[in-house]
Image (cartoon, rainbow, N blue to C red):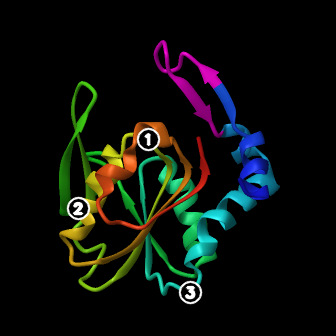
């Protein structure tokens, strides 16, 4: 474990039995409230990609927005949001994906990414991989080149990486 990983872990609070019994929720709000912790998280997630010629950072609603926009600024590139249905005003690409009970949908503006654009996918958490797999599927349809996916936290025991195929993955913290 790296020094930055240890420092960041100390700023994440465990909340037992949330959102349901048996779940140990990793609450990042103390990290977000700590200026140096937030800066360290952004740098730790962005640094491996400084020489990767990233054109856009893509972040999924909602915590992917927090880290995605900051990482885009750190990498001097743009940001594209992936939203829940009905939140974007123009024509969208969409993808349905499975949840524990049922399905959900994610959307992105059709004109947000062009073929050949080099993108970095960002989210706060890699758990089962369902949300990021859906995001990757939608972005791949545009002809973009997916450089990697960067996460603040990865829950390795849930094996979310397996759903992400051959996408390069960087996680600042692993549990």
Q: Residues within 10 Å of mark 1 (few under 14, many from 20)?
A: some
Q: Based on the picture, tell me whether residue 26 belongs to the magenta stretch.
A: yes
Residue situated in front as seen by the camera: 90 or 53: 53
Q: Nearer the viewer, mark 2 or mark 1?
A: 1
Of marks 2 and 1, which one's residue comes earlier in the chain? 1
Mark 1, residue position:
127
Where residue 168 appears, as percent x and y from the top left, is: 42, 67
Q: Is residue 7 left or right of residue 16?
A: right
SS class, disc 1: loop
| Image depth: mark 2 or mark 3 in front | 3
In the rendered structure, the answer to whether residue 155 lies left or right of residue 131 reads right
User: Could you say which quadrant of the image residue 42 lies in?
Assistant: bottom right
Q: Which mark is residue 62?
A: none
- The C terminus lies in which quarter of the figure? top right
**What separation in Å lies between label 3 and label 1 (alpha carbons)?**
27 Å
Residue at 30% across, 73% down: 112
Residue carrying label 2? 138
In the picture shown, does residue 171 fall above or below 20? below
Q: Of helix, strand and loop, which one carries label 3? A: loop
Q: Earlier in the sequence, mark 3 or mark 1?
A: 3
**Highlighted magenta segment, given as a residue range:** 15-28
The alpha-carbon separation of the residues under discs 2 and 3 comes to 25 Å
**Residue 63: percent from the left, percent from the top?**
51, 48
Give the number of the disc on residue 51.
Answer: 3
The reply to whether the C-beta atoms of the residues labelled 3 and 1 are less than 8 Å apart is no
Residue at x 48%, y 20% (from the top left corner): 19
Q: From the viewer's perspective, is residue 152 above or below residue 149?
A: above
């Amino acid at each position: 474990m790296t020094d930055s990983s240890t420092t960041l872990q100390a700023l994440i609070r465990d909340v037992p039995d949330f959102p349901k019994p048996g779940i140990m929720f990793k609450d990042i709000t103390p990290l977000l409230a700590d200026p140096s912790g937030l800066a360290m998280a952004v740098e730790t997630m962005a640094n491996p990609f400084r020489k990767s010629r990233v054109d856009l950072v893509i972040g999924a609603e909602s915590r992917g927005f927090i880290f995605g926009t900051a990482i885009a600024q750190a990498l001097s590139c743009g940001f594209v949001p992936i939203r829940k249905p009905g939140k974007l005003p123009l024509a969208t690409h969409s993808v349905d994906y499975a949840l524990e009970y049922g399905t959900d949908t994610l959307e992105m503006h059709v004109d947000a990414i062009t073929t050949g654009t080099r993108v970095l996918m960002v989210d706060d958490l890699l758990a089962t991989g369902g949300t990021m797999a859906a995001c990757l599927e939608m972005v791949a349809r545009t002809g973009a080149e997916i450089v990697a996916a960067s996460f603040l936290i990865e829950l390795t025991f849930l094996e979310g990486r397996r759903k992400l195929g051959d996408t390069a993955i960087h996680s600042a913290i692993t549990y």
